[in-house]
Image: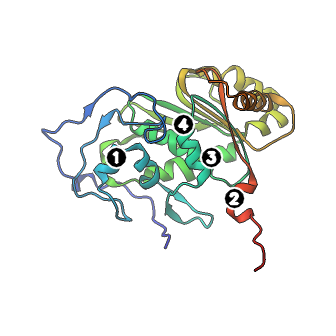
Amino acid sequence: MPTRRPRTTPNCAAQPSTKGRPVRRGKRADIAKVEQPLVVAPSTALVVPDNAVIESGGPALREILADPWLRFTNLYCTKNKHGERVHFKPWPEQVELYRDMHFLNVILKARQRGVTTAVQLIALDRCLFNDDTNAGVIAHNVKDAQAFFDDKIKFAYDNLPDALRCTITAKSDNKNELAFSNGSSIRVGTSMRSGTLQFLHISEYGKLCATMPEKAQELRAGALNTVASGNIVVVESTAEGAHGHFYELCDRAEKLKDAGTPLTDLDYKFFFFPWWRAPESVLRAAV
């Protein structure tokens, strides 16, 4: 049964001391797929209690933290359609995106298929388990930007096990940014004019291109250039007509996919998540 839980401060004093057992830091992991997907492997070996488990039970927290797929499918909490706190369990579209993600990704999607949630959890996970990683999320309006931060990113962090939040603390927590003790940060806004990002998510870019073309051009010239080759960009939107930069990205990426062309670091990978893939959209025949 889903439960509501108020935001709490982690009880770090109750966690076993890590004195004499330093947190080890290493290199970022190589890119891999499927069992070891793009968002792989922590650069920090966290020290956590051997008996720590997530609230729903299951594998030891240490085992979960060591495996990126287990983290994605077990570690995070989200809100369901009723506003209740639930443990995140990915839908098929979210699994496909996680498994097949490229450096540059463009997603044509139906509404309410969890794409935005999945991308933002991936961004948060990347910041928590990789040192000195900056992630940015761009929404097409201020209301959505605040909802992304409060209801997805910050909610997921606030509901992590205390053992993890005591190891990677939020040293800065304001209305649109979390900055962590490992040097990483994630921020949300309607633009990203400064700074270098290793992960960029642009939500509802098609709507932005259709309704505010000048703002879309600003993002195209600015934010998209803050991410160096070899890092991650995810551009997603519902369809907004056969024009604009989002349409152009989808058109080119789909043609590359259909032709079976091997992608370079500078090519966008095309994902299509239509409404008819949703189980609730299937009309059951009468028996």
How much space separates mark 2 and mark 1, taking CA atoms? 30 Å
Taking the spot 19% from the left edge, 36% from the top edge, the residue there is 22
Q: State yes or no: discs 2 and 1 in contact (Cβ < 8 Å).
A: no
Residue at image mark 3:
116
- Position of residue 225 relative to residue 280, above or below, is above
Residue at image mark 1:
65
How much space separates mark 3 and mark 2, taking CA atoms? 16 Å
| Residue type marked 3 | Thr
Taking the spot 38% from the left edge, 65% from the top edge, the residue there is 56
Mark with earlier residue (4, 1): 1
Q: Residues within 10 Å of mark 3 (few under 14, many from 20)?
A: many
Which tag is nearer the camera, tag 4 or tag 1?
1
Nearest the eye: 219 or 236: 236
Q: Secondary structure at mark 2?
A: loop
Q: Residue 204's quadrant in the figure?
A: top right
How much space separates mark 4 and mark 1, taking CA atoms? 23 Å
Which tag is nearer the camera, tag 3 or tag 1?
1
Q: Residues within 10 Å of mark 4 (few under 14, many from 20)?
A: many
